Image (cartoon, rainbow, N blue to C red):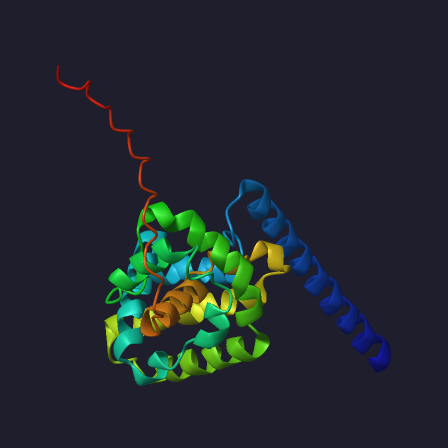
Amino acid sequence: MAKKTTKQAAQKRARKAMKAHAKSRERHKAATKSGVALSENAVQHQMLSEFGNMQNFVKNIVALAGLMRVEEDLKALRYNPDEVYAKFDLAAEREPLADAYAKADDYPAYDEKHADFWRDKRRAILKDLVTEEFQDRCERVFKKLILTKKGFKKEYRAVLAGHLLAQSQRVALTPTEAPLEDNNLWELILLATIKDHPRELPAAQQNEAEPATAAVEEPPAE
C-alpha cells in the first residue's frame, strides 16, 4: 500500500511539472508571435517585479555599464578581443568602429544610425563568444557581487539586473526565444571589449576627384 501511495504521489508530481512546463511553453510561443523577446519568461517577470517597469530596468543596466569601468570583477568580464576583431573588416566597417571609439567613456553608446549594423554584428559573432563556459563565468561574478553589494542600493540593483540577464539565456526554452543579439548584457560586454581594446583603423578613403574639365582654348589674338 505504501509503495502504491508513493508511486501515485510521484506520478502526480510529474503531471504537475509537465503541466507547468506546457503553460510556460505556451507563454513563450505567445511572446514569440507578438515579437517581444523574453516578455513572458520567468526571468522577465522577476525583472519587472524587482524594477517595476522596463524603464527602471534599463536605468540599472546603464548603472551596470558604469560599474564595468571600475569594479575589478566586472572589468575582467570581457570577450577575447582577438576573437572579437577577427569578425570585423576594419576597412569596410571603419565608420561604426570609429563612432564607438569616439564614445569610449560610455560603454553602451553608439550613434543611432549604426543600430542595425551592431545588431547584425552581434547576431553574427555572439554565438561564438557566449559559450557555456563564459555564461558560467558571468553567473559566478554576479552571484559574488550580489552578496558584496547588498549594502549599496544602486550598485546592488545594477548587478542584480546583470545577473537576471545572464540567467535569462538559460531559462529560455529555445535559443530563438532568447536571441543573443537582443540580450543587453552580451551587447554591453561586446561594446566594452571593443572600446577597451581599440584597433588602429585604416585612413578614411577619399572620394575620387572629379575629372578635370578640359581647358577651353581661347582663339588666338588677331
Q: Which residue is painted at 47% across and 70% down in the image?
A: 84
Q: Which of 175 and 211 is in front in this view?
A: 211
Residue 1 visible at all: no
Image location (x, y in percent) of residue 163: 43, 72
Image location (x, y in percent) of residue 44: 47, 58
Q: Which residue is painted at 75% across and 63% down in the image?
A: 15
**Count of all numbered marks drawn on residues in the image:** 0
Residue 155 visible at all: yes
Image location (x, y in percent) of residue 141: 42, 82
In this picture, is 14 found above or below 19?
below
Q: Is residue 200 left or right of residue 17?
A: left
Image location (x, y in percent) of residue 55: 31, 52
- The quarter of the displayed image where residue 61 is located: bottom left
Q: Which of 48 and 201 is in front in this view?
A: 201
Q: Nearer the viewer, residue 102 or 14?
A: 102
Q: Is residue 190 left or right of residue 220?
A: right
Q: Which residue is painted at 60% across and 52% down in the image?
A: 28
The residue lying furthest to the top in this view is 222
Q: Is residue 93 left or right of residue 135?
A: left
Q: Which residue is painted at 23% across and 67% down in the image?
A: 105
Image quarter where the N terminus lies is bottom right
Image quarter where the C terminus lies is top left
- The quarter of the displayed image where residue 162 is located: bottom left
- The quarter of the displayed image where residue 25 is located: bottom right
Q: Is residue 25 left or right of residue 187?
A: right
